[in-house]
Image: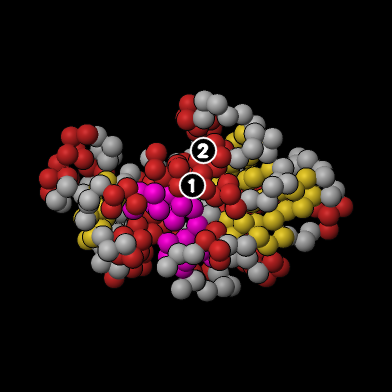
Amino acid sequence: MVTEDQVRIDYINDPELQRRDIRLGMLRLDLLHPVISGNKWFKLKENIKAARDQGHTVVLTFGGAWSNHLVATAAAARAAGLQAIGIVRGLHADTATSDTLQQCRDLGMQLQTVSREAYNRKEDAAYLEQLGLQFGRPYIIPEGGNNEAGMRGAGTIAGLLPGDTTLVTLAIGTGTTFCGIRQNLAQSCAMLGFPVMKGGDYLQGEIAARLPRCANWQLEARYHFGGFARHNPELITFINDFYRQYHIPLDFVYTAKMMWGLLELAGNKELPAHSHIIAIHTGGLQGNRSIKDQLCFSLPG
Ligand SMILES: *Cc1c(COP(=O)(O)O)cnc(C)c1O
């Protein structure tokens, strides 16, 4: 199923980086599996294990019409012999037509579309209790795999990084992956996170609260391109150029924004010379289905 030894590091050979003695590699978590890709696998694996250990036969989780997490959960649950329920944020134009949701159904996930108001209660105890009764006491995984087990699983990504890494960068949604890695990485190695939603600076306090004993991390919130899943023609051109040059496919929601930001910082000499930087390719390529006609490469799987 998912074998973590598929993961490798690809180095970006850029003359400007080489001149400043910066080695920049991408940790290719996108290669894990075509559907259960990237960081979603790491956040799910401990949750799936907990669900089984606690004797559950059903897992329930939440997501939007193009959610990487929803489809990864559908595939991981199926592989583990668990039933999966997906609560989908509704009243979204794509809910009826999304290829991601169709794939969830094809993987056997039962979907229930709910109103935005109901969806916004996804962390309320009373709402979860009601869903629990409705769906036969499932193991509930929060949206994006954002819980303790998710963070613990994400922490194991740290073990895939070379020992002489000086800076680790990744895109941030909930921050679960970032926090999990920070907790498991040597304090001497710096971390830089790129929130992909508008106003991502609010995550500063949230992440600090989750990392009481960790230092040496920073957020760079300027590269949101207008907001979560927003994009412009320049970003699409960047994704296509990056693929032609390095043969690495990026997704437009997360990894492309991070790489754009990282290369811009490098160009402005805002990254330390004589360093070994690992940018984490957190996967998410299935999300490119919503813009597939604009890309020069095909989707995995
Ligand atoms: C979900 C996702 C992220 C964000 O992960 P968090 O743990 O929520 O911060 C980053 N990259 C990709 C490709 C994702 O699918």
User: Residue 146 or 77: which is nearer the viewer?
Assistant: 77
Residue at the disc numbered 1: 154
Report if residue 8 is visible in the image.
yes
Q: Is mark 1 within 8 Å of ligand 1?
A: yes
Tell me which residue sits at (14%, 51%) in the image: 136
- Name the amino acid type tagged 1: Ala
Tell me which residue sits at (53%, 69%) in the image: 294
Q: Which residues are magenta?
A: 30-48
SS of the residue under disc 2: helix
Residue 92 sits in quarter: bottom left
Q: Residues within 10 Å of mark 1 (few under 14, many from 20)?
A: many
Numbered tag placed on residue 298 in the rendering: none
Tell me which residue sits at (43%, 62%) in the image: 36
User: Residue 268 or 27: which is nearer the viewer?
Assistant: 27
Q: Is mark 2 within 8 Å of ligand 1?
A: yes
Q: Position of residue 80 (x, y in %)?
A: 32, 62
- Which residue reaches farthest right? 19
Tell me which residue sits at (44%, 56%) in the image: 41
Q: Position of residue 298 (x, y in %)?
A: 52, 74
Looking at the image, do the residues carrying marks 1 and 2 touch, with CB atoms under 8 Å apart?
A: yes
Q: Is 9 on the left-hand or right-hand side of 229?
A: right
Report if residue 256 is visible in the image.
no
Residue at the disc numbered 2: 179
Q: Earlier in the sequence, mark 1 or mark 2?
A: 1
